[in-house]
Image (cartoon, rainbow, N blue to C red):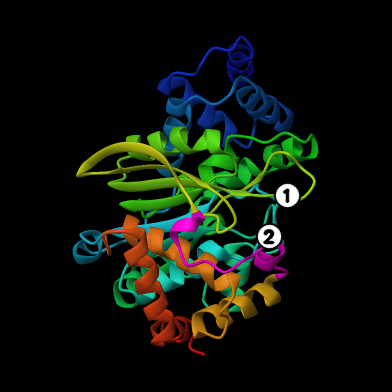
């Protein structure tokens, strides 16, 4: 079956929803050869994943995830996830994870879905664990933490057991230098099924398709962004899977009470300090945890703080907590300088 679908993809023919369901059954089966799975994923990537294909993979793979038992009161809230797809290879510190903690300090319910590092030195799971925040919560514990602390981490490895049979094929593709659809799917696989999402992607061409996917999955409030980063000696900028404080950010967004729009945001609209990519650099999990602590405590006053304030401003806006990114920036600054962000970290880590 998988070989038949692979040949279809090589003919540049998109998969139907039923074929996606069949492909998932084959990809998650122990009996199907790793090489056949890798060939399928390669053919899909080389054809180019259609918006509906990505949405169908996300929809049906999510059905195989472990569902946390959220109570009605928690489910009725706006639930936010903020994350990047990774893959920008720019080695910044854990901006999205820091933003998630700031938003939780502001009373936003944040279901942070993530994993250990794949394309960076420190993934969200790595840095949260180093900060003392549990990443191994049971579904019941995670649901309780969401309700009581407005934050829980949902470790992808724990909530997607079907992925264990896909991992070797992804690894084989990586060894071949081939990206796969799973580079896109990570942020779409949150088992909580959040109502609001801010996603960063590594190329501007991905913003609108990924936002359309979010919309088709039933997200009420969604924003997908990629930010330009000037590279000395190169005519074209690199791209960050976050809002950039160094260049223009491409934005695709939609909200349940208004339509779908695409736009560009200039850093000149915000009170940013002069900075370069080196000012946003991270390191290993210990180095990044130290950066997160400094930012949340208000001790970091430079470009790293600016990056967090800009991205937190957008996340608070996506969550419906504020009426503009500028208002979100101001709220994020107050949460940090007033001690609520560091108090949130202490409540979650017990330190």
273 is within the stretch colored magenta:
yes
Tell me the chief SS of the magenta region: loop
Look at the numbered disc 2 and give the secondary structure of its residue.
helix
Q: CA distance from mark 1 to mark 2?
A: 8 Å
User: Alpha-carbon neighbours of circle 1 within 10 Å: few (<14), some, or many (≥20)?
Assistant: few
Circle 2 sits on which residue? Answer: 277
Find residue 273 and report its horizontal and vertical position in percent: 57, 69
Q: Which mark is residue 231?
A: 1
Give whichever of discs 1 and 2 has the lower sequence position: 1
Percent from the top left, x then y, of residue 120? 70, 57
Q: Nearer the viewer, residue 175 or 259?
A: 259
x, y percent for residue 40: 64, 24
Q: Is residue 337 left or right of residue 331?
A: right
Which residue appears at 57% of the width and 37% of the height? Answer: 28
Judged left or right of residue 316, residue 172 is right
Q: Quadrant of residue 143?
A: bottom left
Q: Residues within 10 Å of mark 2 (few under 14, many from 20)?
A: some
| Marks 1 and 2 in Cβ contact (< 8 Å) | yes
- Evaluate whether residue 1 shows in this view: yes
Q: How many marks?
A: 2
Q: What's the mark number on residue 78?
A: none
Does the magenta run of residues contain 269?
yes
Query: What secondary structure is found at the residue carrying circle 1?
Result: loop
What is the span of residues highlighted in magenta in the rendered image? 267-284
Observer-nearest of 231 and 350:
231
Residue 32 vs 234, above or below: the answer is above
- Horizontal arrangement in the rendering, residue 294 relative to residue 276 (left or right): left
Q: Residue furthest top?
A: 11
Which residue is found at the position 36% from the left and 59% from the top?
Answer: 325
The residue shown at (44%, 34%) is 208
């Amino acid at each position: 079956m998988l070989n038949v679908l692979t040949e279809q993809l090589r003919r540049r023919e998109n998969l139907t929803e039923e074929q996606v369901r069949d492909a998932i059954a084959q990809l998650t089966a122990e009996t199907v050869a790793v090489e056949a799975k890798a060939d399928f994923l390669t053919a899909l990537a080389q054809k180019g994943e259609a918006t509906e294909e990505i949405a169908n993979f996300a929809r049906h793979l999510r059905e195989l995830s472990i569902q946390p038992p959220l109570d009605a009161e928690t489910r009725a809230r706006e639930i936010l996830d903020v994350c990047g797809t990774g893959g920008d290879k720019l080695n910044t510190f854990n901006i999205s994870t820091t933003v998630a903690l700031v938003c939780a300090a502001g009373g936003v319910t944040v279901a942070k879905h993530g994993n250990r590092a794949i394309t960076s030195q420190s993934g969200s799971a790595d840095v949260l664990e180093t900060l003392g925040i549990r990443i191994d919560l049971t579904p019941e514990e995670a649901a309780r933490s969401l309700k009581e602390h407005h934050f829980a981490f949902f470790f992808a490895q724990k909530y997607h057991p079907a992925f264990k049979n896909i991992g070797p094929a992804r690894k084989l593709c990586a060894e071949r230098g081939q990206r796969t659809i799973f580079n896109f799917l990570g942020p779409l696989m949150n088992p909580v099924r959040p109502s609001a999402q801010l996603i960063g992607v590594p190329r501007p061409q991905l913003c609108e398709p990924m936002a359309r996917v979010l919309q088709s999955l039933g997200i009420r409030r969604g924003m997908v962004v990629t930010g330009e980063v000037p590279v000395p000696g190169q005519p074209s900028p690199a791209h960050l899977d976050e809002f950039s404080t160094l260049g223009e950010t491409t934005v695709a967004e939609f909200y349940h009470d208004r339509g779908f729009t695409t736009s560009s945001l200039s850093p000149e609209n915000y009170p940013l300090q002069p900075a370069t990519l080196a000012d946003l650099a991270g390191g290993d999990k210990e180095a990044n945890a130290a950066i997160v602590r400094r930012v949340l405590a208000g001790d970091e006053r430079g470009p790293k703080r600016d990056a967090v304030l800009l991205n937190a401003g957008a996340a608070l806006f996506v969550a419906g907590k504020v009426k503009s990114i500028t208002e979100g920036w101001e709220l994020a600054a107050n949460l940090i300088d007033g001690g609520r962000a560091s108090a949130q970290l202490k409540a979650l880590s017990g330190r």
